[in-house]
Amino acid sequence: MDTRYNPAEIEQKWQNKWTEVGIDKTSTDSNKPKFYALSMFPYPSGSLHMGHVRNYTITDVIARLKRMQGYRVLHPMGWDAFGLPAENAAIKRGVPPSKWTYQNIEQMRSQLKRLGLSIDWDCEVATCSPDYYKWTQWIFLQFFQAGLAYQKEAAVNWDPIDQTVLANEQVDNEGRSWRSGAIVERKLLRQWFFKITDYAEELLNDLDKLPGWPERVKTMQANWIGKSTGAYLEFPVVGMDEKIAVYTTRPDTVYGVSYVVLAPEHPLTKQVTTSEELEAVEAFIKEVSNQSELERTAEDKPKKGIPTGGKVINPFTGEEVPIWIADYVLYEYGTGAVMGVPAHDVRDFKFAREKDLPIKVVVARADAADAVLIPNEAYTEPGIVVNSDLFNGMPSADAKKAIVEYAEKQGFGKARVQYRLRDWLISRQRYWGAPIPIIHCDDCGAVPVPDQDLPIQLPENVEFSGRGGSPLAQLESWVNVDCPSCGKPAKRETDTMDTFIDSSWYYLRFTDAKNDKQVFDSAKVNDWMPVNQYVGGIEHAILHLLYSRFFTKVLRDRGLFNFDEPFQHLLTQGMVQGLTYMNPNKGGKDKWVASSLVNPTNPRDPDTGEPLQQLYTTMSKSKGNGVAPEDVIAKYGVDTARMFVLFKAPPEKDLEWDEADVEGQFRFLNRVWRLVTEFVDNPQSSKKSKNQEPKSKVEKDLRRAIHTAIKEVSEDVDSEYQFNTAISELMKLSNALSDAKCKDSPVYPEGIHTLILMLAPFAPHIAEELWHLLGKDDSVHTANWLKHDPEALIADEITLVIQINGKKRGDLQVPAQLDKAGLEKYARESEAAQRHIENKTIKKVIVVPGKLVNFVIG
């Protein structure tokens, strides 16, 4: 037999065979327990990177393992296919977004298949396909009917050149549009929102139902939801009937208010501004409108503000305090106004110092309650309330409650729970997204498109210029329709939905992907959900996961299924990092030098000759540190690439790409290949594993190594998915088989079978080939996962270490079942001990069962 390992040949062979027999189809055997293994689906950019390889390999190992453990497994794949890149491609390349997208899907599908992933491609979905976004639109209408979808005026990032709304992520640190380069403005537009705030409390509380999620992710979500308990207080505007409402978590400091700040875009700003300050205020509002939200709230940026000339009355003191406007207060947050308490807030203190505003201490340290002079810095900790009339001397925690109760009795405040979470702005002035299924009628208002008229398909006769707002709004033949309610002329909604909506329910569609009559069959979704294991990047820890949880709760409340949370266990895999070269004397993107241009033995900038710094950072095109999966596969094969990304680091940790370690995994698979093929070629060896009791010590030792491997690998992969240590155990078993002195014993084929079976989820192609070389007819991937024999782990003999005064002087083999007295007897009579204790006084004997005997001599 040819002993050479040829991965390209066997990998293509078995991928074709698996496709032919449908080995990866989802089982419908309801007698088996279910397991839903899911990777976060990719955007079809056109090419896989090593991060994709790692993500999908991790999930594939889990899916393969669970099938072998007797589960029916759902392991699907799809495409998060709407979004700006396709629209940009249409502008740049002059091709329709759909054509560009489907070409990329076809290319990436073939790349995924090349990885040998056990995906059921019959479940494939693409969010840009009408048979998918029909149901995205249907779900929108479920939100609309529940009162959870609404329109309102909202301040947005507006690109004045492209005439469109930008997400915060599309605005750079200088406040410029990522595409046009224009200075972004803040503008009020009528936009669609989902009322996620209605579920804030449940989204927060139900994090406790997710013990299988990393604590880090749950903390990130809790912080994003941002629940706080405080007070809603109203400050009457001097000379007007209006009141400025503020929310504060520190009502104990209300006697220290020395000014109130409005957001520049607050509706009351113009009303409270005096004629003397009007010109300056209008100029300031215009200046702030050119800043993005990120700019305005950046911690390291100086806070700007000016007085309006207006004043409010502090209802607790009766004092008049000035009204200011400042860039750091946003109308969308809270009430759009804050009370300034400089003595007890770091930002307020700095602002008051710059603007020469009063600073009044009203909370002091418990050990310095009389220290009420103007401070040198803000005191933000709890303490004793001072300069606060009725509440003087109270601990600040007690004063918070008492002050809120007083405000409620007086009618100018009340206790309030507030969340940092804001309603989800879902409108996008784009073409390549799911059209919002609403028709606007002058008489009937916002009218939902009837279910039978879904999907509202994207028109194809659209021009893409990248200018002038949504292409849909410019297509009158598509916009102008009759009202479904009254029949009068009306207009379609021209906004499309945020692509996060598409990905907020795709895991539900996978359970019934080809259903053209309903969004999914409730019985099927209740059967398969929740997802048992979800795998994806930490960058999705907040928005995608939070939105998916929100969707699940809303659709549950609409009676579509009976579970509360979508993802039972979450694994956030680390990034794949490449060796990267950086010129510290350059800035921006120019500082990165592609690895292909550098001599690694003397790394220097090819342009300037300056020495380069070496570091590991996440692989990316801009840094020139990427490794193309197809290059690795062409050189080493798929199984080696899989083994490397699994072995190099635990799945949740970052992985540093190292060619030498890839070579190491390739050598290991070659050793396994030789080990099995030599066994098959050996005419003396027994080809079948026989259940005969091992008789000799070498047989017992080998069987112990086999069952130790079964036990350790099973424990490594069953809960924490520590694939790196599992592969280490396979290497140990391989070494034990290579070194075995009983290759014609019935125990040896048991070891060979065990090694191949346990290798199968990790390196599926080589395992399948070797399994069939053993004469097997069925696939190794349909074989049962092994269980260890506890009896096989029990050693007949142990190695007992002999120590004299704590130093090892020898060892010997002794029966494993000996008690302390027996171990001491064997040790005393050993040659190693006799040489040192003869004619010596033994002061003490220390026996550690199963390990050592230590004689303490004088």
Image (tube, grey):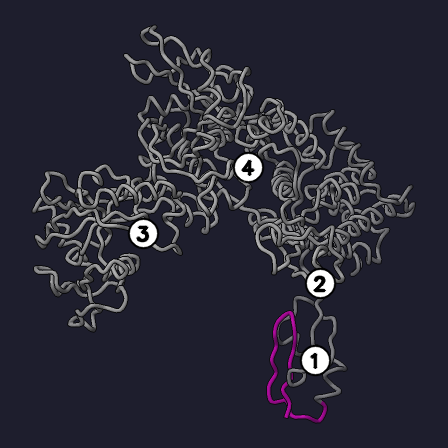
Q: Earlier in the sequence, mark 1 or mark 4?
A: 4
Q: In what quadrant of the picture does the N terminus appear?
A: top right
Could you tell me the amino acid type at mark 3? Lys
Pointer 1 and pointer 3: residues touching (CB < 8 Å)?
A: no
Q: Secondary structure at mark 2?
A: loop
**Other-residue count near label 3 (Cα within 10 Å), few / some / many at <14 / 14–19 / ≥20:** some
Residue bearing mark 4: 40
Closer to viewer: mark 4 or mark 2:
4
Could you tell me the amino acid type at mark 1? Lys
Q: Which mark is residue 796?
A: 2
Mark 1–mark 2 Cα distance, whole angstroms, equals 23 Å
Q: Earlier in the sequence, mark 1 or mark 2?
A: 2
Question: Whole-percent x and y of residue 766?
Answer: 77, 41
Q: In what quadrant of the picture does the C terminus appear?
A: bottom right
Q: Secondary structure at mark 4?
A: loop
Mark 1–mark 3 Cα distance, whole angstroms, equals 74 Å
Q: Would residue 721 be counted in the magenta stretch?
A: no
Closer to viewer: mark 1 or mark 2:
1
| Left or right side of 230 for 812 | right
Could you tell me the amino acid type at mark 4? Met
Q: Earlier in the sequence, mark 1 or mark 3?
A: 3
Q: Earlier in the sequence, mark 2 or mark 3?
A: 3
Q: Secondary structure at mark 3?
A: loop
